[in-house]
Amino acid sequence: MVGKLLIIGFGPGSFDHITKRAQEAIQESDYIIGYKTYVELIENLLTDQEIISTGMSEEVSRAQAAVRVAEEGKTVAVISSGDAGVYGMAGLVYEVLIEKGWKEESGVSVEVVPGISAINSCASLLGAPIMHDACTISLSDHLTPWELIEKRIDAAGQADFVISLYNPKSGRRTRQIQEAQRILLKYREPNTPVGLVKSAYREREEIVITDLENMLNYDIGMLTTVIIGNSSTFLYDNKIITPRGYQRKYTLNTKDQRLKPHERLRKENEPWALHKGKNDMTNVETEASEAEKVGDVPHTTSLELAEEALSLLDGVSAERQGVKTVSNPMVSIFEFAISPGIVNKQFSPKQMIALAEVVGEEGSIEYTTHHQMHLRIPTANPEVITEKIKNAGFIIEPLGDVFQLKACDFCDGEKKDSIPYAEELHQNLSGLELPKGLKVGFNGCGMACYGAVNDDIGIVFRKGKFDLFLGAKTVGRTAHAGQPVAEGIEPNKIVEVIEKIIYEYKEKGHPNERFFKYFKRVEKIQGFVHQDMTPKIEIEPAPCGD
Ligand code: SAH
């Protein structure tokens, strides 16, 4: 009969945080082997298991005993706090097995049952300090030379990892944590947030939020995990938060991030990433790091210098308050659309120059299908940019799920009677957030050569009055024009009619529901009855069969 080794991590120490599999595994076993304190922690789970509990430093003999009993055909649970594979018993048990020439096929069976490690349980009590690239370092130099530990602290400090220190201090080992602090202060600000969690999720739990400079003024012991933030970690309402990314993207005027999933990974939206190919932003990165090597500041415009100065000031005031708070003005990608006018489609040379200056070397300009320029500009100060764009006479529009008006050029103003209505609609509704992006086409004569009938809502001026088209499906195999729902709407009514339709959709549309789908679902919008415009055409399969 082949025995079984269950190597179990039971989490931080509270019953609620033991996994179901760990509970079952403990109950399945004939023997429990573990450090006394840990056996006591799981006492309530035990039925008739035999307990082999040992002292703290007897890990090797514990592993040997476990293997021996398993080889006798028993099921043996070896328990570790947190995760058994993180400074726990898992590696040790495997080492003992390997020493004996164990092979999975023929030897005792082994199952490692994962548990919540201290880095996770302690982080959860501090806010969200880990979030980004992080590492664990044990300061115990009983089994690892201090020289190597020192090297790892240094490297982690330099590489800006969030660091979780296990085994930070004991009765005899008191200098290690002092050394760790000294090394990290070479790379991190004294006000870098630090969390000290003692006995997470146990009876004597203690949580301290402090900073790198002051962390040694608090009690740190064998049951403490020390979590040290990276250079962007900040403190908010007594929580330690490490931002998910170093750079953020934001758009004009909208609360949420409006980059569509497929747009987020584009090169121009992530200029800081390592991209393939030659003609990309990696050159910029190389230049920046070269500059840093010679002690230069990579950013040189007066705006950036001013921002840097401000951020230093911010740092000073935060320091006075103690721990570092939200301060660094992060460069983010600012995204929005511009056009030279609602009716005007012409750019002046002066406007082109202003545009080039604002966008600079690192931004991008994309001409869209909606007669707009889509700008993406890395900046820490979007207001300065919008100001310059407005001064150049552009119309600025947010991106994302908002109202957008596309008007024709009214034959360069010759057919100008309806222009005021287009402008009024733009003024009243521009940037209005909606369940899904909504394009309203506004054309100045019955020709509708700017394709208003193919927009979500089409408005066509004809013989002094307006025709209205609703619910075009602009993309896909079943694309179709909007349904003509009314003709001859009086000019003094058109703005009101359109606003009512749009506000109804805003209020009652489901998130992400396109206008044509909404119209189809509710069947009637502001009295206009839906008719199915989906083309009913049988498409023959291709002769070749695919
Ligand atoms: N296997 C364990 C780690 C064992 S090393 C795990 O994955 O969590 C022992 C160290 O773990 C302690 O010195 C302490 O730094 C940390 N630790 C373990 N349990 C903890 C708890 N409940 N609260 C805080 N730190 C804990």
Image: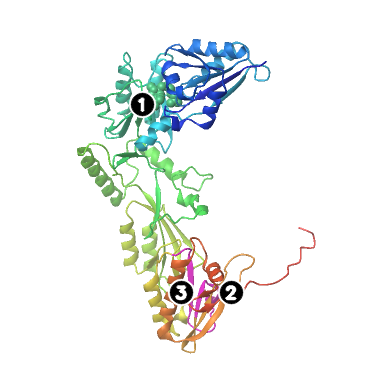
- What amino acid type should be assigned to the residue bearing mark 2? Ala
In the rendered image, which residue does mark 2 sit on?
Answer: 481
- What amino acid type should be assigned to the residue bearing mark 3? Ile
Q: Is residue 492 above or below residue 370?
A: below
Q: Are marks 3 and 1 in contact (CB under 8 Å)?
A: no
Residue 475 visible in the picture: yes
In the rendered image, which residue does mark 3 sit on?
Answer: 501
Closest to the observer, 154 or 165: 165
Please report whichever mark, 1 or 2, sits nearer to the chain's N-terminal start: 1
Q: CA distance from mark 3 to mark 2?
A: 18 Å
Q: Is residue 189 above or below residue 390?
A: above
Q: Is residue 311 above or below residue 467?
A: above
Q: Is mark 1 within 8 Å of ligand 1?
A: yes
**Residue 9 locus on image (x, y percent):** 49, 25
In the rendered image, which residue does mark 1 sit on?
Answer: 199
What secondary structure is marked by label 1?
Answer: loop
Closest to the observer, 386 or 317: 317
Is residue 135 within the magenta segment?
Answer: no
Ligand number 1: quarter of image: top left
Q: CA distance from mark 3 to mark 1?
A: 59 Å
Q: Residue at x 57, y 69 (%)?
A: 473
Between disc 3 and disc 2, the foreground one is 3
- What amino acid type should be assigned to the residue bearing mark 1? Ser
* Magenta residue span: 434-459
